[in-house]
């Protein structure tokens, strides 16, 4: 449920690119400094820009070779998790729904188990079986700005239930209990890939780096002599405006918002983050940013907390270890978790607009 989101990075200067995952672009820049070089590359992957940045004295070729390994890992994971690529693990799970279990890769099993944990934490507000609704609501390249009929939505709701996704770790299989159910990893798969990318860069000897994939980001070490400074986008302001910044090292940062893939109909905003209990766009938040140690957790939680909304979502953040968050509610109220107070720098109040 999270995808195509811009996370403004105040120091690193990241931008968003548009296009499908099968289109590839690249960009590079090197900033000279006494401590080393800041080297960047970007490509389109998993439906959004994947930007890799390292601060290193090892030379450009060493960094570029490591970047290529990360790009290849994203491609490999996309082939396993995509709902668009025939033969992916996810497509095979969906095709066998209500019929039989199917063997899946260790990676997909890991993601599905993380998803079930986040579903439990959020009382089912995060639910990877929301894929049963995806043909009714269209917010990808097929966006048609159409509100589906309540009757059509009601017919699909019984097919959305994470508890009907059965995983057998020992056998390495996954099974959807009802025919017509569909898994969709759009709200968590990218976070898992970011974690894998971070592991690759660490294994290659890099300690100071940033990985950004749409609204999911991981930073390690420092940018030169200071932490990475990250900005949270103003959900009703211009795309390049941050309302707050946070200095972060060795952590992940994921933002979900209602401002990227949406349309307005009769004065009402409809966006891509669906409440699985209603089968319709969630209404309690404008944006949610989660800070955590694992990108896969931040990715799934940013969606689940967005759907939960202000007070309930913040209560959950405060209960979870090594998780912090910032919520802009549907009433434009700003909520900041206790662990970020004194660390988050408020630049301006979020813009108050519909």
Image (spheres, rainbow, N blue to C red):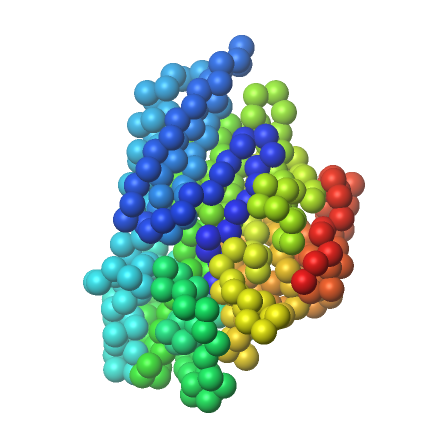
Q: Residue at x 75, y 44 (%)?
A: 348
The percent coordinates of residue 307 (x first, y second) are: 60, 67
Query: In screen coordinates, is 115 left or right of 339?
Result: left
Which residue appears farthest toward the left when viewing the image?
87
Q: Residue at x 54, y 31 (%)?
A: 12
The one of 345 and 304 positioned closer to us in this rendering: 345
Q: Residue at x 67, y 39 (%)?
A: 246
The percent coordinates of residue 233 (x first, y second) are: 62, 46
Which residue appears farthest toward the top when viewing the image?
34
Q: Residue at x 28, y 62 (%)?
A: 84
Q: Would residue 338 be visible to someone looking at this image?
A: yes
Query: In screen coordinates, is 311 left or right of 127?
Result: right
Residue 334, by quadrant, is bottom right
The percent coordinates of residue 105 (x first, y second) are: 29, 58
Up-down relation of residue 271 to residue 328 (above or below): below
Which residue appears farthest toward the right when viewing the image?
342
Up-down relation of residue 163 to residue 242 (above or below): below
Up-down relation of residue 132 to residue 354 (above or below): below
The percent coordinates of residue 350 (x first, y second) are: 72, 51
Query: In screen coordinates, is 107 left or right of 5?
Result: left
């Amino acid at each position: 449920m999270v995808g195509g989101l811009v996370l403004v990075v105040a120091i690193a200067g990241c931008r968003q690119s548009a296009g499908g995952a099968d289109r590839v672009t690249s960009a590079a820049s090197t900033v000279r400094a006494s401590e080393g070089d800041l080297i960047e590359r970007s490509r389109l992957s998993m439906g959004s820009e994947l930007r890799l940045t390292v601060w290193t004295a090892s030379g450009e070729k060493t960094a570029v070779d490591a970047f290529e390994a990360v790009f290849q890992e994203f491609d490999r994971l996309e082939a396993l998790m995509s709902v668009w690529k025939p033969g992916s693990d996810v497509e095979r799970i969906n095709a066998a729904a209500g019929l039989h279990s199917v063997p899946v890769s260790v990676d997909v099993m890991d993601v599905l188990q993380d998803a079930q944990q986040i579903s439990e934490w959020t009382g089912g507000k995060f639910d990877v079986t929301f894929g049963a609704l995806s043909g009714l609501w269209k917010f990808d390249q097929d966006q048609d700005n159409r509100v589906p009929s309540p009757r059509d939505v009601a017919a699909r709701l019984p097919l959305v239930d994470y508890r009907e996704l059965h995983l057998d770790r020992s056998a390495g299989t996954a099974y959807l209990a009802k025919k017509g159910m569909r898994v969709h990893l759009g709200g968590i798969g990218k976070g898992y890939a970011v974690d894998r990318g971070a592991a690759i860069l660490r294994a290659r000897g890099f300690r100071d780096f940033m990985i950004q994939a749409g609204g999911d980001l991981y930073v390690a070490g420092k940018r030169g002599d200071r932490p990475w400074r990250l900005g949270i986008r103003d959900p009703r302001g211009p795309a390049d405006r941050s309302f707050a910044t946070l200095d972060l090292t060795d952590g992940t940062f994921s933002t979900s918002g209602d401002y990227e893939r949406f349309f307005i109909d009769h004065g009402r905003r409809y966006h891509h983050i669906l409440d699985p209990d209603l089968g319709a766009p969630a209404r309690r938040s404008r944006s949610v940013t989660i800070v955590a140690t694992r990108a896969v957790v931040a990715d799934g939680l940013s969606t689940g907390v967005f759907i939960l909304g202000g007070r309930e979502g913040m209560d959950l953040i405060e209960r979870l270890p090594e998780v912090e968050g910032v919520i802009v509610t549907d009433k434009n109220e700003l909520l900041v978790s206790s662990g970020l107070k004194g660390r988050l720098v408020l630049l301006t109040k979020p813009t108050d607009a519909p």
